[in-house]
């Protein structure tokens, strides 16, 4: 979090994160080139330019697949939350790799004639009536434009000025980009490959992304305390001990956004508070985050809120609705009617008064 716009907050964590990321990317590309040279010798040898082209493409596609898997993995296991904090760094890196692949391909295949290299590549003898002659460059170009647009608008300046709703809608286009890249590879590189391993890897990647999203949706639905349309009465949540310390139990009321019921400790001891579970920054799921340093911390980008106040700590000014909580016969209950954003609400105290 930052109280003002800066290009990148290069703290130690992000420096290590990016150094490890680019070291892995470099190792991936180098390994691909080396093993390809070993596997293809003599008449089957592949030029260095083509190997680098393929290495850039494969690394970008692999990284995009990983990015799409991080969200559902974090919902299935909180240990993956560490990858969420700087997921935008992964996205920008992936877009740069895709741009490098596209630029090198354009120069290699269209840069030696009199025509503009881009037009030379796009204007090759292609037809929409044939799979083998389909202009596979078009879905690749559309995917690249989406990825570059997302990378260019990844900074919080655009999030603030576009509004979280429209910014998030724009960045959901990553799924369209992924589909377009699947088509780009299937209609392009796979048309000249005879080994079944390549289509298996492509379909396997798409299957992993799909299965993880479905699994996380099912697990998330199962974790929710309950869903109900009548929100006039207090809702039974759980026994205090059933809520993990410094974590939340989500409560859903019909189609309304979830309520995050957190159990934590403050200067007076154990406490339970409830807050709107949608982060004001980018709509992140606060109920999947945890209490760090006395503040609820969003698992997406680290935005923080005081549990009993629904306010970000100074100098920040984000606020969220809070909810009344109480203990009745050893059970945590929450009033599903939200209070105005930033309203201080006394927490329930296990071990104290049982019926507030």
Image (cartoon, rainbow, N blue to C red):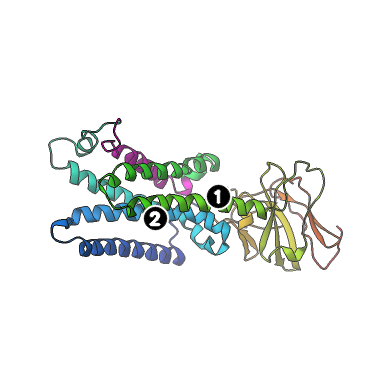
**Residue receiving disc 2:** 63
Q: Residue at x 74, y 61 (%)?
A: 272
Q: Residue at x 78, y 43 (%)?
A: 231
Locate residue 292, reporting x and y percent.
Answer: 61, 65
- Callout count: 2
Give the spatial CA distance, label 1 vs label 2: 20 Å
Quadrant of image for the C terminus: bottom right
Q: Residue at x 71, y 42 (%)?
A: 254
Q: Which mark is residue 214?
A: 1
Is residue 1 in view? no
The mark nearer the N terminus, 1 or 2, is 2
Q: Is residue 64 above or below residue 22?
A: above
Asked if the stretch drawn in magenta spans residue 141, the answer is yes
Residue interval drawn in magenta: 129-157
Locate residue 180, reporting x and y percent.
Answer: 38, 41
In front here: 184 or 186? 186
């Amino acid at each position: 979090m930052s109280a003002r716009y800066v290009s990148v907050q290069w703290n130690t964590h992000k420096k290590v994160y990016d150094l490890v990321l680019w070291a892995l990317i470099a190792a991936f590309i180098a390994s691909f080139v080396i093993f390809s040279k070993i596997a293809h010798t003599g008449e089957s040898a592949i030029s260095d330019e083509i190997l680098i082209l393929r290495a850039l493409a494969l690394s970008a596609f692999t990284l995009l697949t990983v990015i799409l898997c991080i969200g559902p993995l974090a919902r299935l296991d909180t240990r993956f939350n560490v990858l969420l904090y700087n997921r935008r760094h992964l996205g920008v890196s992936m877009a740069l790799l895709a741009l490098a692949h596209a630029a090198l391909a354009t120069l290699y295949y269209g840069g030696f004639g009199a025509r503009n290299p881009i037009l030379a590549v796009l204007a090759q003898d292609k037809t929409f009536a044939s799979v083998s002659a389909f202009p596979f460059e078009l879905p690749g170009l559309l995917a690249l434009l989406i990825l570059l647009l997302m990378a260019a608008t990844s900074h919080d300046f655009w999030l603030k000025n576009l509004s979280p709703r429209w910014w998030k809608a724009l960045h959901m286009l990553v799924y369209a980009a992924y589909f377009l890249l699947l088509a780009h590879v299937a209609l392009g590189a796979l048309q000249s490959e005879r080994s079944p391993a390549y289509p298996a890897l492509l379909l396997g990647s798409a299957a992993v992304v799909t299965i993880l999203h479905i699994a996380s949706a099912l697990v998330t639905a199962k974790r929710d305390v309950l869903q109900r349309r009548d929100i006039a009465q207090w809702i039974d949540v759980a026994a205090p001990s059933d809520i993990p310390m410094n974590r939340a139990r989500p409560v859903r009321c019909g189609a309304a956004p979830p309520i995050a019921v957190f159990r934590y400790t403050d200067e007076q001891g154990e406490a339970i508070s409830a807050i709107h579970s949608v982060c004001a920054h980018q709509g992140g799921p606060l109920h999947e985050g945890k209490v760090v340093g006395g503040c609820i911390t969003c698992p997406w980008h680290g935005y923080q809120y005081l549990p009993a106040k629904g306010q970000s700590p100074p100098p920040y000014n984000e606020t969220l609705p809070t909810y009344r909580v109480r203990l009745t016969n050893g059970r945590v209950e929450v009033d599903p009617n939200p209070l105005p954003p930033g309203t201080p609400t006394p927490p329930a105290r296990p071990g104290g008064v049982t019926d507030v």
